[in-house]
Amino acid sequence: MELGIRSPVHATLFHHFSNSLLFPARLTLLNTTSSSFMATHLHVSSEEFDPSPSLAIGQHDLLIVGPGILGRLVAHNWRQEYSGCQVFGQTATTNHHRELTEIGINPSLKWTKASLKFPYVIFCAPPYQSSDYLGDLRLAASCWNGEGALLFTSSSAPYDCNDNGLCHEDSPVVPTGRSPRTDVLLKAEKIVLEFGGSVLRLSGLYKVDKGAHAYWLEKGIVESRPDHILNLIHYEDAASLSVAILKKQFRGRIFLGCDNHPLSRQEVMDLVYKSGKFSKKFEKFTGTDDPLGKRLNNSRTRQEVGWEPKYSSFAHFLETI
């Protein structure tokens, strides 16, 4: 996720790989109270579930590595597409296993070390939660049976642009060695592509209480330049795009997720203020010499996948809340 945020703290706060350890379930369900969320296939305790190799895996069953905000929305959408399928979730700890079970995700710590193979696998886990991120990704990819699709939700950060210029799916990426953050993402993408899976580079994810606007409202004064261009996509749209890509069963492709309405930081906060829907008040950006951003366009992705966002822009989203 690219939000034009320089510090490690900011990158952590706004990285799209938000898992259940960072975001409690009460903030992630997003009004998904349908009975389809109830677990019907396995009775899993709040402790670690040790999967049995004899467990029957169906042709539409899905493994989600990192079932946080995005992963849970993917699970909900997937079950709507394939009624009766099983959705499995691999987590870093057992802290939220009970919550996941309650919304129909069968959780475990050891899916990638099990002998089970899944037709659909999506990897949404964050690098900062793992001591061996690339190893975890290889293990997750090895759980794919090659029949459906493997998808890695990456970030738009690797695109090599800091002059508010235009970027699309095939734009050049940051050279290896310039940034540890982009290095790990590009290495992760390479692993997935070598397995025959696909990559979805997501721009700045947000919902009403998460994202750049929410952080800036909390800060009030931000030491960043106001004219830096950033790109956004709502969590619900990122989930629907992920599901659409999985359903198409692409192989070895790179896609881009954004709303095609780039905004400057100042424009984002002006929209927040004009909406009148937030109690906190943002004061100002004070930066003058930090890097600019990029203007993402994913028209190719939309055409190939057959997808359009629910929220066409951040302004459109604000009109709906």
Image (spheres, rainbow, N blue to C red):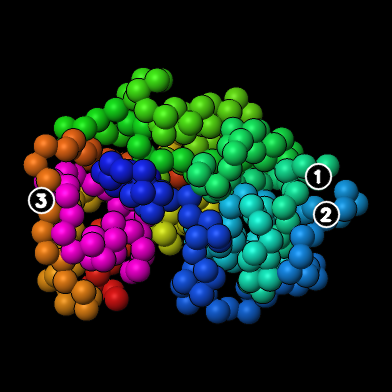
Instruction: Tell me: residue 316, above or below residue 249.
Output: below
Instruction: Tell me: residue 235, above or below residue 178.
Output: below
Work out whether mark 2 precedes mark 3 in sequence or the reverse, and give the earlier one.
2
Q: What residue is drawn where x is 58% and y is 78%?
A: 34
Residue 114 — which label? 1
Mark 2 in CB contact with mark 1 (< 8 angstroms)? yes
Which residues lie in the magenta part? 204-233
Residue holding disc 3: 286
Quadrant occupied by the C terminus? bottom left
On whether residue 208 falls in the magenta region, the answer is yes
Left-right relation of 281 to 203? left
Residue type at numbered disc 2 = Pro
Q: Disc 1 on helix, strand or loop? A: loop
- The percent position of residue 45, horizontal first and vertical second, equals 78, 70
Q: CA distance from mark 2 to mark 3?
A: 52 Å
Q: Nearer the viewer, mark 2 or mark 3?
A: 3
Disc 3 crowd, CA 10 A, few/some/many (<14, 14-19, 20+): few
Q: CA distance from mark 2 to mark 1?
A: 7 Å
Q: Disc 2 on helix, strand or loop? A: loop
Work out whether mark 2 precedes mark 1 in sequence or the reverse, and give the earlier one.
2
Q: Nearer the viewer, residue 297 or 271?
A: 271
Residue type at numbered disc 3 = Thr
Residue 51 — which label? 2
